[in-house]
Amino acid sequence: MADVQPLRALHYDTAVVGPLSDVVAPPYDVIDAGQRAELIERSPFNVVAVDLPRGEPDPYAAAGNLFESWQRQGALVRDAEPSLWAYTEDYTGPDGCSRTRRGFFCRVRIEDYGAGRVRPHERTHPGPKEDRLRLTRATRANISPIFSLFSDPDHATWNALSPATEKAPWGEVTDADATLHRLWRVSEPSVIAEVQAATRASELLIADGHHRYETMQAYAEEVGGDGEHRYILMCLVALEDPGLTVFPTHRLVRGLDDERREALERALERDFEITEVPPDEVEPPAGGGPLELGFLDGRDGRTRRLTLKDQAIADAALEGHSEAYRHLDTGVLETLLLKNALGLSDDDIAHFNGLFYARDTAEALAMVRSGEYDAAFLMRPTPVEQVRDVAAAGENMPPKSTYFFPKLLTGLLFNPLD
C-alpha cells in the first residue's frame, strides 16, 4: 500500500532569486558542460549548481554548503504547513501532438520493491547511484523528484485536486522544449485526505528516477531509525491520464567488425522479414504484433524495415520470461540481436560498451551516417499498458525501454530529509 503524504516543501522565494525560469533546470543527466554554464549564467541560484556539482577537492561538499547558504540567505524557504502540489504540463510531444499531463507532488514512504508497494520497470546502471548518494548525504534533501505512475481509473485524485487549479498558480515556467509547467499548493486537510484515500491501495510504478529511488533506499538504511529520511519526493501521474505518453528510445551500435556483421546478417535473414524502405519511413509505426524495427547499416547506407517472422522465435529465445516480456520490443531486440548475434553482455549494455541511445530518429540516422556508430535500430514506443504488465510480472525492462515526455523540471520543489 502506498503511503502518500503531504510535505513541508523547501522552495525558491522568487522575491529573492527572481523568476523561476532563471533557477530551474532540466534533469542533471541530460545537461552537458555548455548547458550547465548557460544555466548558471542565468542566475547564481540556479539549481544546477547543486544538482550537478563542481568544486575542488570535494564537489559534493561544495554543493551541500551552497544549498545550506541559499537557505540562510532566504533564497530557499520552507513551508510552515504540509501540502500537496497539483501540477500540469502543457506540451507538444515528439509526434507533434499537443497534450496536458496532470499529476501532483507529494512525499512517499520508501519501500522495498514488491507487489502492492513500489515497482521498478527498467534495469539500472551502477554509476549514477553512487553519485546521487554522495549528493544526498551532502544536501540532506531530495533535489529532484521521482516520476511514478499509479492506477486511478475514476480520476479520483485529480477530481479532488482540480478545484485548486482554477485559481492562479503558485508558480509557472516554460522550459526549453516549450512545455508550460504550472504548480498549485493544496493545503486543505479534506482534499489531502481525499487524495490519500484514493491512492492508499495503489501500487506505484517508477517511470523515471530508478537510480534516485534506489539511492534513497540506501540512504534511509544508512541513517537508520524513522523520520523524514524515510520519505522521498515524487510526482505521481495516473496511468489513465490522457496526457501520459511514452515515446521510443533508439539503439545505436558500434564495433561491428566483419565477424559481428556476418553474425548479425545471419540472424536478420533467419528471424526477420526484411524490406527496404525510404529513410523517412524507417521508423516503425506504433502498434502491436510481433517485433518491428527500423534498421540502418552504416556500411551500405540502406534503410530497412525488420519484422519478426513469428512470435514463436521470441518465445523460444526468452523462455523463462513472462508473456508480457516476450512481447516487449526492447527485450526481444536485446536477446536476439544485441546479445545472441552481436555478443554484447549485460555488463556491456550497463556500461554503454558498444551500445548507445538516441531519442530522435534523425539524430540516430545522422550518428550512423557520420561514422560515429555502425548501425541503428529504430524502435516503436512501448505502450504504457505493457510497461505496467511487465512490472506486474516482477520483471525489469532493458535500460532505456521508455521515454516519458516531457521530463520533470528540477528546482520546482525540494524535500528536506531532516
Image (tube, rainbow, N blue to C red):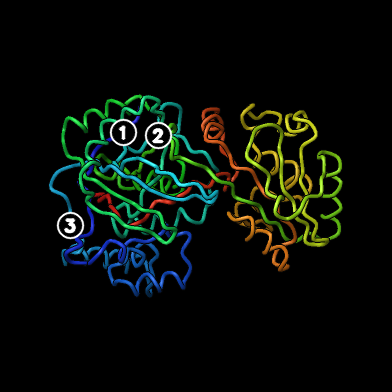
- Say which element carries label 1: helix
Q: Which residue is mark 2?
A: 238
Q: For marks 3 and 2, give the CA distance.
A: 30 Å
Name which residue type carries label 1.
Trp
Q: Which residue is mark 3?
A: 77
Crowdedness of circle 1 by 10 Å Cα count: few (<14), some, many (20+)? Answer: many
In the rendered structure, which amino acid carries the disc numbered 3?
Val
Q: Are marks 1 and 2 in contact (CB under 8 Å)?
A: yes
How far from the left and from the top, in percent, is residue 11? Answer: 23, 55
Return the disc, 3 or 1, that comes first in the chain's sequence: 3
In this rendering, the label closer to the viewer, 1 or 2 = 1
* Image x and y of residue 114, in percent: 45, 30
Q: Residues within 10 Å of mark 3 (few under 14, many from 20)?
A: some
Q: CA distance from mark 3 to mark 1?
A: 27 Å
Q: Circle 3 — which element?
A: strand
| Quarter of image, res 362 | bottom right
Residue at 41 percent of width and 32 percent of height: 150
Distance from disc 1 to disc 2, alpha carbons, whole Å, reads 9 Å
Proximity of marks 3 and 1: CB atoms separated by less than 8 Å: no
Vertical placement of 105 versus 171: above or below? above
Residue that appears at 31% across and 33% down: 158
Amino acid of disc 2: Ala
Which residue is denoted by mark 1 in the rendering? 158
* Residue 38, percent from left and from top: 40, 73
